């Protein structure tokens, strides 16, 4: 299987998962699965995201940058990584601040923007992968969380009484963002002049968004004040996802 075919199949699979996950809640306006089950899945996905960021994306970015821009001493990949992290942190904090003024509009729209940016970035990270093993690690991370993220976005939009047409439009846009990111990343990887810089930059920026989604975002939207045993289950799944990506890094 060629790399282009792999990425095309990955884009189709990701889109279908995103759409299939929200068909039932959109039709019935009910949750497709218990909230606790979704949170367990998100915990596993967060561990995978963190592992992909530290074992795959950031090391690739640093390696490429040092190979082709060895005269630059400033830690550019790390700075770009922090930029991705801070962008999502800013948008999410903005949504929480604005929610006090416009609680029925600001939260769902800004949350959608955060998720759309992340979806586009993760797609670009997969698209610029130079071999199947690197792209596979990112694909695993995306598949692990895509369905739950789609459902969560759909539930938030409906909970804040967004119009059905608007909810459907945002959900479809979210589903398309990762395939669009894959296409854009592939175009950069294949055709762009100065592609080494963009490969390093995309990977670093994606690492920042992955780190944010797996840490602060995870803690913000899955806070636990009780049910310590259940919280420990989330930790175990988080650790398994992280360790799994560490093991996968041995073969990539």
Image (spheres, rainbow, N blue to C red):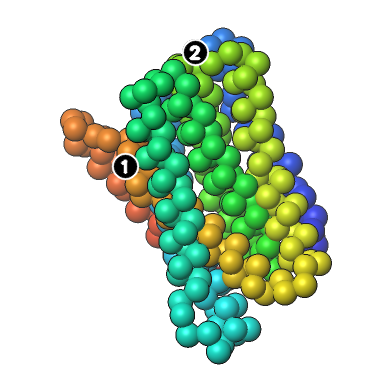
- Residue found 56% across the figure and 10% down from its top: 28
Outermost residue to the bottom: 71
* Alpha carbons under labels 2 and 1: distance apart: 25 Å
Left/right of residue 96 with respect to residue 196 in the rendered view: left
Of 76 and 39, nearer the camera is 76
Secondary element under disc 2, as helix, strand or loop, is loop
Q: Is residue 2 visible?
A: yes
Residue indicated by mark 1: 219
Residue 128 lies, in percent from the top left, at 68, 62
Residue indicated by mark 2: 161
Secondary element under disc 1, as helix, strand or loop, is helix
Q: Is residue 31 visible?
A: no
Vertical placement of 250 versus 52: above or below? below
Residue 32 lies, in percent from the top left, at 51, 20
- Residue found 53% across the figure and 12% down from its top: 29
Vertical placement of 248 versus 76: above or below? above
- Residue found 53% across the figure and 24% down from its top: 154
Earlier sequence position, callout 2 versus callout 1: 2
Of 67 and 252, nearer the camera is 67
Which quarter of the picture shows residue 23? top right
Residue 228 lies, in percent from the top left, at 19, 36
Of 171 and 79, nearer the camera is 79
Residue 179 lies, in percent from the top left, at 70, 45
Which numbered mark, 2 or 1, is in the foreground of this view? 2
Q: What numbered label is drawn on residue 136?
A: none
């Amino acid at each position: 299987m060629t790399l282009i075919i792999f990425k095309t199949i990955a884009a189709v699979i990701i889109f279908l998962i995103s759409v299939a996950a929200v068909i039932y809640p959109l039709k019935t306006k009910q949750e497709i699965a218990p909230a606790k089950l979704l949170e367990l899945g998100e915990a596993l996905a967060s561990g995978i995201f963190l592992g992909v960021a530290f074992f795959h994306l950031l090391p690739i970015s640093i390696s490429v940058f040092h190979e082709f821009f060895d005269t630059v001493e400033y830690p550019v990949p790390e700075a770009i990584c922090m930029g991705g992290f801070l962008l999502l942190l800013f948008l999410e904090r903005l949504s929480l601040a604005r929610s006090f003024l416009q609680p029925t509009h600001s939260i769902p729209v800004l949350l959608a923007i955060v998720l759309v940016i992340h979806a586009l970035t993760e797609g670009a990270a997969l698209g610029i992968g130079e071999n199947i093993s690197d792209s596979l690690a990112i694909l695993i991370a995306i598949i692990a969380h895509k369905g739950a993220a789609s459902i969560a976005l759909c539930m938030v939009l409906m909970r804040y009484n967004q119009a059905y047409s608007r909810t459907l439009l945002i959900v479809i846009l979210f589903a398309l963002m990762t395939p669009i990111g894959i296409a854009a990343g592939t175009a950069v990887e294949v055709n762009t002049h100065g592609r080494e810089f963009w490969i390093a930059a995309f990977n670093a920026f994606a690492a920042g968004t992955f780190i944010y989604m797996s840490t602060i975002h995870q803690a913000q939207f899955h806070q636990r004040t009780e049910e310590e045993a259940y919280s420990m289950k989330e930790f175990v799944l988080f650790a398994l996802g992280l360790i799994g990506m560490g093991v996968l890094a041995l073969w990539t």
